[in-house]
Image (cartoon, grey):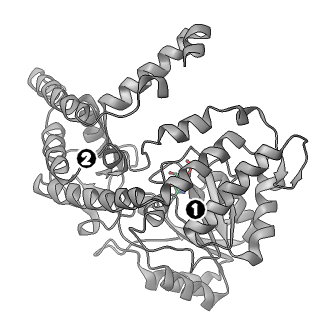
Amino acid sequence: FGALERDDPEIADVLLDELARQRDTLTLIASESFTSPAVLAALGSTLANKYAEGYPGHRYYGGCAQADRAEELAVERARELFGADHANVQPHSGASANLAAYAALAEPGDPVLAMGLPHGGHLTHGSRANFSGKWFHPIAYRVAPDTELIDYDEVRDLALAHRPKLIICGATSYPRLIDFARFREIADEVGAYLLVDAAHFIGLVAGRAVPSPVPYADVVTCTTHKALRGPRGGMILCREELAQRVDKAVFPFAQGGPMMHAVAAKAVALREAGTPAFQEYAHQTVRNAQALASWLTAEGMRPVTGGTDTHLALLDLREVGVSGREAEARCAAAGIALNKNVIPYDPEKPAVASGIRVGAPSVTSQGMREDEMRRIAELIGLAVRCDPQTAAGTSRLAGIGEEVTGLVRRFPFYQEQEV
Ligand code: PLP
């Protein structure tokens, strides 16, 4: 970091300010957590200089011996941690992993059955704004209006009616466990491949806090930067028969050279994720999310589906009389980072939304537990009710902000030289 301060003080300043922001914000963004200093060290390493198109032992560049070692370690650790036949650790992101999975399992124009975006699906699950909706024929399944749980009967009916080539499960804002066995059954009944997009919950799978999709899916895609606490990036796990197709779909179909510094950082994160300390982290993350959901209920917010089995909760704010957009802005003014989110069958447009999504991976990484979740819920309850248009509201938000700063500073992380 000394070299950066000397050679580019402006960017050094940005990084120090970002460190201060991360330390002084209460981060409840469900898709974020904090990597270890070891992961950051691998990311900021000389492997960033290396081109290594291809796979270990079969590269299109010379000088790849170290790149091969890093990738082999990452692949081996992923296979062992998740009990998968094959792992590809090269995808640059979760979206790239999904692009490669589509390419491996379907042809343009094929019907693909996945959860609709308004019900918790991801852009890559068939949004018209994305390759998945433009190049494939998307069919969306929903959650049931009464239980807000995936309507497996509807999934089966849609599968029988449309005969999709690919069925996708896994979501961005679904707080409950997914019945992978049921999806497998439906996929088998119609001869479809089953892709589980485990981006959000792969860290919990690694920590044995939720069931693994690996025994059920043909292909599992994920990100490595959410609760798994690795570098920003993606990963694909699959059965042996599909290994070659998946590898070719990543390179040369979807990507060029892998980011070897990120691959090395994935290896570090995968090693960390195999430790008892990580298992404790994953279980505590779920306990914290459950505590948060139940204390937010006491603040007048309704957890969608009645609660959570995972690292996140989705709260319906209609009883409070505040939109998701307002709640997000009010919490931000108090130093609490969370995001507005549509709830199933939301009467509001996505830019306004009736709900918020909260996640526990970051605060759990900092060492917070159920007691802190109770206070956090109270602070959110106070913040969402402060009208920033009034002087009284603004001053109350500032007061809440001070308490938030006091709370997060009791759980410090990263030294300055580690940014
Ligand atoms: N799939 C799911 C379910 C996600 O939630 C996300 C990101 O939030 C992605 C894929 C895409 O990951 P990335 O942002 O790394 O492209």
Q: Is residue 245 left or right of residue 278?
A: right
In the image shown, does 400 or 320 lie closer to the viewer? 400
- Measuring from the top left, give residue 304's x and y in whole percent: 28, 63
Does residue 107 show up?
no
Name which residue type carries label 1. Answer: His
Mark 1 or mark 2, which has the lower sequence index?
1
Q: Which mark is residue 125?
A: 1
Q: Is residue 124 left or right of residue 383?
A: right
- Mark 1: is the Cβ under 8 angstroms from ligand 1? yes
In this orientation, does residue 261 appear?
Answer: yes
Please name the residue shown 60% across and 68% down the image: 80
Secondary element type, mark 2: loop
Q: Is residue 104 left or right of residue 392?
A: right
* Residue identified by numbered label 2: 368
Whether 310 is drawn above or below 39: the answer is: below
Of residues 234 and 66, the one drawn nearer to the viewer in this rendering: 66
What is the CA distance from the residue labelled 1 to the residue labelled 2? 34 Å
Instruction: Tell me, for residue 283, which label it has, or none.
Output: none
